């Protein structure tokens, strides 16, 4: 894909993580993109993925907090699914999901069971803000199995009912209700409490993996960190069955505003699993945040969460650094092993200019936007009342 101009040589700069991977130049097709507010990160992401669609690639945005990828998804013939309070759309976390080719019934049933168990567990953990105990695990498992047995289309309220009032036939020691009480009340928030209305019925929307682009628009989710995190957990699980289809082709999975997600352990674990699997399934993950030290704010020093966050960076062979605040230079340079020259370049970068580190190679690139792209990409920004861009691409690409 054409990206723009290499500012040192003046030549065109093209980039394709799958081609680089196929040629053995990188070992993981993931990309990390960091830069200050308004540096042009989202614009670069949108160009990279829209320009790759004619090459047969597809794009999934499992959570778009600003809703700025919606217009792009619609323009390329894809679909944006808007979720939020007071909207008609429902996501059923117990959906079977997309069935990949080549699985027999037994394998598929096992996969569905595992995914449901994992997802209900992750949802409970997100609301509880801690890991489940072994007793809670069992309680959730038994309630889930009972709900699945009792209905063609199991939904979360059934699991909550059975957690709070277990079926006597499944309750071997008479203590299931006690064991599952906290998990039951945590999940109850999603079906009857303040987070109700999104997960409590059969899905009204379908994830169609054949579309060129699918985006989950979370812009109407009112500022509720737990809800966003629960939604993202559901959405990524929902997309997962399609993502983990080896015959699904080459796909971008874009996490814009990723710093918001990094603080949720259940999501971070899921993301980490995706990143490790990326190359086997033809997936290129793109993770966008403001500064690399966002990764340092995850969990406590030396914690498992911090280690996960660092492994995300380690599993991305392409790191694009846009303008950084001067107090961030040391951290960024240390995290990426930048030279003194590279480091001193970072605060001088203009909109759309970035230091691209591809494995050990280093380039400075001006991302060039086509006027039609600028128009389309701005739609989301305008809707939010943001100021339009002060300039288009710089013709000489001069670094300030
Ligand atoms: N290569 C470019 N050439 C010209 N203008 C650009 C370029 N990239 C981005 N812009 C403009 O800069 C503005 C900010 O871009 P964008 O929204 O992509 O920034 P961002 O880094 O994602 O910001 P935020 O941190 O707020 O999400 C937009 O108005 C966009 O049109
Ligand atoms: Mg942005």
Image (tube, helix red, strand yellow):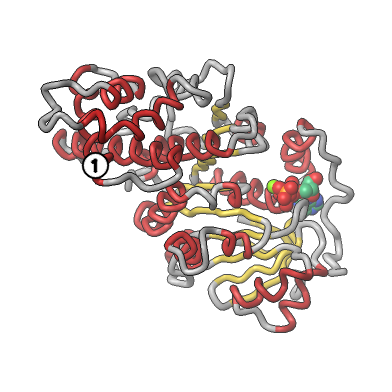
> Residue at 50% across / 66% down in the picture?
310
View extreme (bottom): residue: 340
> Residue at 23% across / 17% down in the picture?
151
Image spot of residue 257 (x, y percent): 63, 48
Asked which quadrant contains residue 375, the reply is: top right
Observer-nearest residue: 231 or 217?
231
Q: Is residue 85 above or below residue 38?
A: above
Residue labelled with disc 1: 135
Observer-nearest residue: 196 or 96?
196
Question: Under 8 Å from ligand 2: the CB of mark 1?
Answer: no
Q: Residues within 10 Å of mark 1 (few under 14, many from 20)?
A: some
**Horizontal side of residue 89 vs 130, given as left or right:** right
Quarter of the rendering occupied by the C terminus: bottom right
Image spot of residue 21 (x, y percent): 45, 65
Q: Is residue 291 above or below residue 376?
A: below
Secondary element at image label 1: helix
Image spot of residue 37 (x, y percent): 75, 53
Image spot of residue 343 (x, y percent): 72, 77
Quarter of the rendering occupied by the N terminus: bottom right
> Residue at 59% across / 32% down in the picture?
217
- Can residue 369 be seen here? The reply is no
Observer-nearest residue: 167 or 400?
167
> Residue at 43% across / 29% down in the picture?
207
Asked which quadrant contains residue 119, the reply is: top left
């Amino acid at each position: 894909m054409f990206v723009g101009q290499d500012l040192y040589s003046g030549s065109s700069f093209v980039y394709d993580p799958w081609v680089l991977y196929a040629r053995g130049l990188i070992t993981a097709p993931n990309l990390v993109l960091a830069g200050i507010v308004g540096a042009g990160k989202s614009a670069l992401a949108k160009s990279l993925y829209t320009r790759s669609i004619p090459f047969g690639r597809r794009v999934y945005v499992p959570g778009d907090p600003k809703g700025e990828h919606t217009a792009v998804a619609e323009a390329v013939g894809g679909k944006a699914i808007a979720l939020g309070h007071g909207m008609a759309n429902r996501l059923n976390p117990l959906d079977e999901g997309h069935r990949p080719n080549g699985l027999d019934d037994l394998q598929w049933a096992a996969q569905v069971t595992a995914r449901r168990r994992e997802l209900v567990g992750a949802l409970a953990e997100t609301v509880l803000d801690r890991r489940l105990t072994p007793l809670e695990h069992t309680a959730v498992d038994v309630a889930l199995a009972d709900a699945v047995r009792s209905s063609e289309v199991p939904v979360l309220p059934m699991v909550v009912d059975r957690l709070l009032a277990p079926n006597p036939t499944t309750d071997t020691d008479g203590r299931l209700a006690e064991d599952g009480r906290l998990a039951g009340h945590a999940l109850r928030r999603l079906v009857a409490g303040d987070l109700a209305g999104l997960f409590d019925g059969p899905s009204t929307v379908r994830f169609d993996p054949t579309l060129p682009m699918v985006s989950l628009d979370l812009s109407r989710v009112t500022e509720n960190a737990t809800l966003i995190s629960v939604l993202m957990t559901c959405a990524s699980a929902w997309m997962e069955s399609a993502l983990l289809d080896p015959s699904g082709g080459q796909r971008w999975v874009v996490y814009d505003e990723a710093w918001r997600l990094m603080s949720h352990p259940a999501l971070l674990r899921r993301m980490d699993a995706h990143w490790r699997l990326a190359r086997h399934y033809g997936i290129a993950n793109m993770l966008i945040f403001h500064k690399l030290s966002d990764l340092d704010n995850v969990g406590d020093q030396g914690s498992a969460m911090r280690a996960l966050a660092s492994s995300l960076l380690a599993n991305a062979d392409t790191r694009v650094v846009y303008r950084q605040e001067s107090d961030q230079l040391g951290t960024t340079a240390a995290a990426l092993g930048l030279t003194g020259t590279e480091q001193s370049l970072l605060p001088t970068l203009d909109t759309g200019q970035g230091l691209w580190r591809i494995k050990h190679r280093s380039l400075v690139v001006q991302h060039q936007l086509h006027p039609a792209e600028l128009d389309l990409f701005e739609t989301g920004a305008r809707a939010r009342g943001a100021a339009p861009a002060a300039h288009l691409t710089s013709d000489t690409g001069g670094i300030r």
